[in-house]
Amino acid sequence: MKTVLHYLRPRLGIMSVGLLIKFFGTVAELLLPWMLSIILDKAVPAGALGGILFWGGLMVLCAAAALGGNVIANRLACSTSRDVTRRLRHDLFARVMQLSCAQEDAFTTPSLISRLTSDTYNVHQMVDRMQRLGVRAPILLVGGIALTLSLEPVLTLVLIATLPLLGLVVWFVSTRGIRLYTRTQLALDALVRRAQESMAGIRVIHALSKGDYERARFDEANARAVNCDQRAGFLMNVTNPAMNLLLNAGLTVVIVLGAYRVNAGLAQPGSIIAFLSYFTIILNALMMVSRLFVMYSKGAASGRRIAEVLAAPADLAPQNIPPVQEDAFLRFDHVSFSYDKVKDTLSDVSFSLKRGQTLGIIGPTGSGKTTILWLLLRFYDPDSGAVRLNGRDVRSIPPEVLHSKFGVVFQNDFLYADEIGENIDFGRGISPEQTAAAARTAQADFIAQRKGGFSAQLAAKGANLSGGQKQRVLLARALAADPEILLLDDSSSALDYKTDAALRRALARDFADTTKIIVAQRVSSIQNADRILVLEDGRAAGLGTHSELLRSCESYREIAQVQMGEGE
Ligand SMILES: Nc1ncnc2c1ncn2[C@@H]1O[C@H](COP(=O)(O)OP(=O)(O)OP(=O)(O)O)[C@@H](O)[C@H]1O
């Protein structure tokens, strides 16, 4: 709730005006039965037409004030909740964008999506309802009880006697509600994850005719989410009838007692009618309070989930590490790293490159090739050792400065549903000439030949391109900003051998000063690299040129033999 209150602070002025209008509107509404009792008990028996007209006119004015006040206050409440949600969503998204990969892994993507969508919606609803009902319900409740006390103190005691029981119901609902709604949100996270997985793999699912299997998996997650929501809903649904029961029981006692008191001449009929109206008003106010607690339970649970992300520490903040004097441009210095902090993913890996040199990385799947790139980009920090650029530890370089040095193509990289040119530019203001040059180096000549050229529209994830075309657009994107360091993670695997060779020649020619790290499965993609790192289960099994490794590294010789028949 602290987080939500923080976002409400800039709106305090407007909220106060809205709540003040709500206050007066509700007071006007509350006075209506009291005025009715004056008309019935005083003006009518005295036959005072002037009195009847005066109080009747006042009632019309009060009713109009109540209506107008409510409408204006509700509109103000709406604008506040909209504004709070917009700012909250904006900051949450900005924070999500800055999360480290380790934090992303911990929160999980589906959970972050539902925090950005359904959780912010729940907070929106809570802020909205709190303003609409938060003032109205207590005034109707407290004011109603005060007025009934002045009208009929004896009967009011019956009303007051039921209040502790009602309070107990509200307390029980709100404490259990937060727990149940947190569980519901977790089930929704799982549902989003299932939907995301199925959408991402929809072609494989079709190809393997696994539609039924996926539907069953989705239904299972769906049923769990519905079940959790049902439990929370059941608790909330029990609240209203339970309160109704208590209040109707009280109402029955009031009617019986009221009839007895009128009969005995201890009370007037007008007061009893007004009392019954107040009883209904108080009943409604209590219903509002219980609804408020439902919204509060949901909103508070969601607010807590949002606050967790906003409060996540900036664990990639630059650290104060003094630079060292060294001749290498890029150095991995005895780096060890583990994702789960149990088993090392990389163990004591070292290599260095001079500016403009190329490192090829090869090794079995899961040997840690991509992890080396993650550490270079400081998506994760090494557990021991250091990654340095020009003698500066990457942990001491501000992320935006560090990342501006890189051009990257990752495995399964993404393309927007936008023009090809926009996908290459990626919001960096790259000139059309630079874009065209990058596309030429990336061997993406097909773009110019395509209808619309660089303005041709891509489908989401580049679905209207072939695998090889996609890789070449992604390469053009990586090259367009003329990076100091180029990281290519298995990014030419879909290219035919001829195009792959042409790409390597173009890179060597047009990006001679760019330091390149190329992760590849094909020996042919890296055999001309200045150095090749052979990884095996996170360890450097070999480091050298192609011919050196053929002589000295058995596992490299085996790969080369299988792929090219070399080294025998
Ligand atoms: N985010 C992560 N959390 C936990 N473990 C991970 C994570 N990413 C990768 N791993 C694990 O770390 C190991 C190395 O993964 P990495 O992606 O670096 O391998 P790779 O050599 O690039 O594999 P491939 O050739 O298949 O792309 C694997 O065992 C993988 O399961």
Image (cartoon, rainbow, N blue to C red):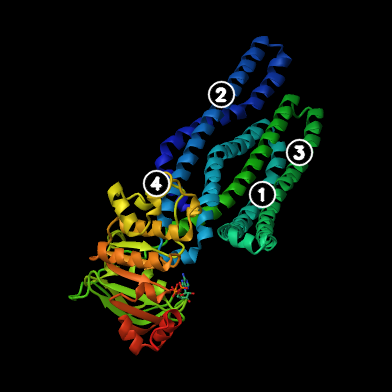
Is the C-beta of the residue carrying label 1 under 8 Å from the nearest atom of ligand 1? no
Q: Which amino acid does label 4 sit on?
A: Gly
Q: Earlier in the sequence, mark 2 or mark 3?
A: 2
Q: Can residue 69 be seen in this snapshot?
A: yes
User: What residue is drawn where x is 29% and y is 54%?
Assistant: 437
Contact check, label 3 and label 4, Cβ < 8 Å? no
Q: Position of residue 296 (x, y in %)?
A: 57, 49
Q: Which of marks 2 and 4 is nearer the N terminus?
A: 2
Between 6 and 150, which is closer to the camera in this rendering? Answer: 6
User: What residue is drawn where x is 78% and y is 39%?
Assistant: 253
Is the C-beta of the residue carrying label 4 under 8 Å from the nearest atom of ligand 1? no
Q: Would you identify the image quadrant in which residue 332 lies?
A: bottom left
Q: Where is residue 346 in the image (x, y as percent from the top left)?
A: 40, 79
For label 3, the residue is 251
User: Which label belongs to residue 552?
Assistant: none
- Give the Cα distance between marks 2 and 4: 64 Å
Q: Which of marks 2 and 3 is in front?
A: 2
Within 10 Å of disc 3 (Cα), the crowding (few <14, some 14-19, many 20+) is some
User: Which label belongs to residue 453?
Assistant: 4
Within 10 Å of disc 4 (Cα), the crowding (few <14, some 14-19, many 20+) is some
Badge 3 marks a residue whose secondary structure is helix
Q: Earlier in the sequence, mark 1 or mark 2?
A: 2
For label 2, the residue is 65
Q: Earlier in the sequence, mark 3 or mark 1?
A: 1
Q: Would you identify the image quadrant in which residue 528 lies?
A: bottom left
- Give the Cα distance between marks 3 and 4: 77 Å
- Give the Cα distance between marks 1 and 4: 74 Å
Badge 4 marks a residue whose secondary structure is helix
Between 262 and 521, which is closer to the camera in this rendering? Answer: 521
The quarter in which the C terminus is drawn is: bottom left
Q: What residue type is labelled 1?
A: Pro
